[in-house]
Amino acid sequence: MPGKIWFVGAGPGDPDLITVKGRKLLEAAGAVLFTGSLVDQAANLYTPPDCEIRDSKDMTLEEMTDWLLDAAHRHATVVRLQTGDPGLYGALIEMTRPLTAAGVDWAVVPGVSSAMASMAAARETLTLPEVTQTVILTRVAGRTPMPPGEELEALAAHKTTLCIYLSITLLHKVQEALLAAGWPGTAPMLVVQKASWPGEEKVVRGTLADIKQKCQAGKIGSQAMIVASPTLGAADWPDLVRSKLYDPVFGHRFRKAILAPENPA
Ligand code: SAH
């Protein structure tokens, strides 16, 4: 029986942000294939000394498949370690179909995605009551075209939180799309490079109009998350609508209401 191949989310960069399950799998791994520069630390920190470790940055899909299948015929536990969560821009299905076809079992361990890590780095929130309750994780078209209806201008029209991956070199396209969707030039924007990387994280705040210049000034050219959200800066707003969950007026399954509502419906 061949071993099992685990697609493990390494998290956004800080090796402490891998899940306990992911770390246990690395500790048990006979072989690890990791993606590029972002997750080498976790691969090296947690694996046993005799573990085979390979960077996949110069490999084609076919080469990765061959490597993983060969490793699975020699080891009970094989890990494919990916940045953030394996299901986001991670080529997961392309990689797993040949494994299924070869009769090798596989499973996914989710990871902390860089959108969450970027908001944490900036001490911002993805959702806020009565401001936005929706998050869109997207990108702009590069070599990979956007499917019809998913152009950034169309998504931005919802005026929800937008976490834009893989697009820092196309920041001008993000600006054009948001302006075309009716966001004002004064709308707050956030760019976080290497969120959670010890000593390397950079947080850039600006507006839709000036975020590109600020990123150029800060030399942010790669590994960055772009966030546009009506929630940005909320920690400093004078007025805030409270969450019903912690409001003394509202009871729920675990807590009785303490106060009577002022204007009962
Ligand atoms: N699966 C990954 C995304 C891979 S696509 C995840 O869930 O996070 C690569 C893109 O992710 C980069 O272009 C960048 O937009 C973003 N990214 C990955 N790590 C990041 C980090 N530490 N800080 C900011 N953005 C990051």
Image (tube, helix red, strand yellow):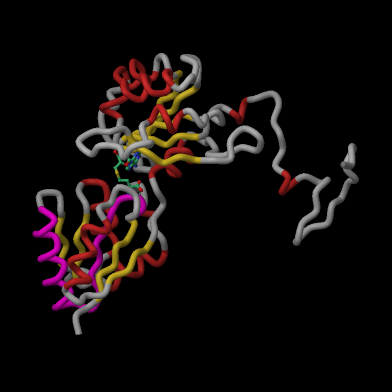
- Residues in magenta, as a range: 60-85
Q: Hey, which quadrant is residue 154 in on the image?
A: top left
Check the image and name the residue furthest to the front: 148
Does residue 35 sit above or below 105 in this rendering? above
Could you say where residue 69 lies in the image, as x and y percent from the top left? 14, 71
Q: Which residue does the image show at 47% across and 38% down from the upper left?
A: 119
Tell how many labels.
0
Residue 41 located within the stretch drawn in magenta:
no
Q: Quadrant of the C terminus?
A: top right
Residue 254 pos. (x, y %): 75, 61
Q: Is residue 211 above or below residue 24?
A: above
Q: Residue at (83%, 56%) from the top-left corner?
A: 256
Q: Residue at x 41, y 64 (%)?
A: 20
Q: Residue furthest bottom?
A: 1
Instruction: Name the side, left or right, on which 12 lies relative to 133.
Output: left
Closer to the camera in the image, 45 or 215: 215
Q: Nearer the viewer, residue 233 or 161?
A: 161
- Tell me which image quadrant ligand 1 sits in: top left
> Residue drawn at (57%, 39%), measured in percent from left and top?
127
User: Magenta stretch: residue 79 in it?
Assistant: yes
Q: Quadrant of the N terminus?
A: bottom left
The answer to whether 177 is drawn above or below residue 114 in the figure is above
- Closer to the camera, 248 or 95? 95
